[in-house]
Image (cartoon, helix red, strand yellow):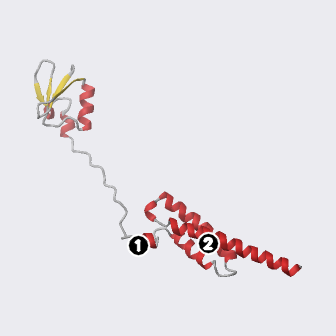
């Protein structure tokens, strides 16, 4: 089969095209079934009846499955990132770490949970919680530092 031309329903013609190019155009959807394929001798064949393209037009269309967007929560997920448990838990642990003495253990836990929550947010931004994760990290670090400095100061003062 030699090079052919494609005539669309509106009269525009494209080509010459090799059989490989014709198949590629048909697979890309650039040749509608209503167009004509014009051979080198001038004979026109409807694209859906053309021996090379007929199977493409008779095959059922391939339907890609729709990817569902995450459900909207109306902004509640921004205020309370319930889809990001690590960030939310880290936030509350960081707040409770403000209680003197509790920061010794809760501070490092808040930092760890905050980092985990922020990584979860970076992987899946729809989960929200970046601000809560940062608050957990900062509060956890400050309360850990202050509590441990307080303990060290008490030990030094007791030994002096």
Residue 18 occupies quadrant: top left
Relative height, residue 45 to residue 83 (above, below): above
Q: Residue 139 carries which label?
A: 2
Separation of residues labelled 2 and 1 (CA atoms)? 23 Å
Q: Which mark is residue 76?
A: 1
Q: In this view, does 154 lie to the left or right of 29?
A: right
Mark 2: secondary structure: helix
Residue 127 occupies quadrant: bottom left
| Residue drawn at x 77%, y 77% as measured from the top left | 151
Crowding at label 2, few (<14), some or many (≥20) Cα neighbours within 10 Å? Answer: many
Q: In this view, does 39 lie to the left or right of 125?
A: left
Q: Position of residue 53 (x, y in %)?
A: 20, 32
Depth check, front residue: 19 or 60:
19
Q: Which of marks 2 and 1 is nearer the N terminus?
A: 1
The quadrant the N terminus occupies is: top left
Q: Is residue 42 left or right of residue 75?
A: left
Relative height, residue 99 to residue 7 (above, below): below
Q: Residue 40 carries which label?
A: none
Depth check, front residue: 64 or 146:
146
Q: How many labels does the image show?
A: 2
Q: Position of residue 90 (x, y in %)?
A: 57, 71
Mark 1: secondary structure: helix
Relative height, residue 17 to residue 26 (above, below): above
Q: Residue furthest top?
A: 41
Q: Residue furthest right?
A: 160
| Residue drawn at x 26%, y 37% as measured from the top left | 28
């Amino acid at each position: 089969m030699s090079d052919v031309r494609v005539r669309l329903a509106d009269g525009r013609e494209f080509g010459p095209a090799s059989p490989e190019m014709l198949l590629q155009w048909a697979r890309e959807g650039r040749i509608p079934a209503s167009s004509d394929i014009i051979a080198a001798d001038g004979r026109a064949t409807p694209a859906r009846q053309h021996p090379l393209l007929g199977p493409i037009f008779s095959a059922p269309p391939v339907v890609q499955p729709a990817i569902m967007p995450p459900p909207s929560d109306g902004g509640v997920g921004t205020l309370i990132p319930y889809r990001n448990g690590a960030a939310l838990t880290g936030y509350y642990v960081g707040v409770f770490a403000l209680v003197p003495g509790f920061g010794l253990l809760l501070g490092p836990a808040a930092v760890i949970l905050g980092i985990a929550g922020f990584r979860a947010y970076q992987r899946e931004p729809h989960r929200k919680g970046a601000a809560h994760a940062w608050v957990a990290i900062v509060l956890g670090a400050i309360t850990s530092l202050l509590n441990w400095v307080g303990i060290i100061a008490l030990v030094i003062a007791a030994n002096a």
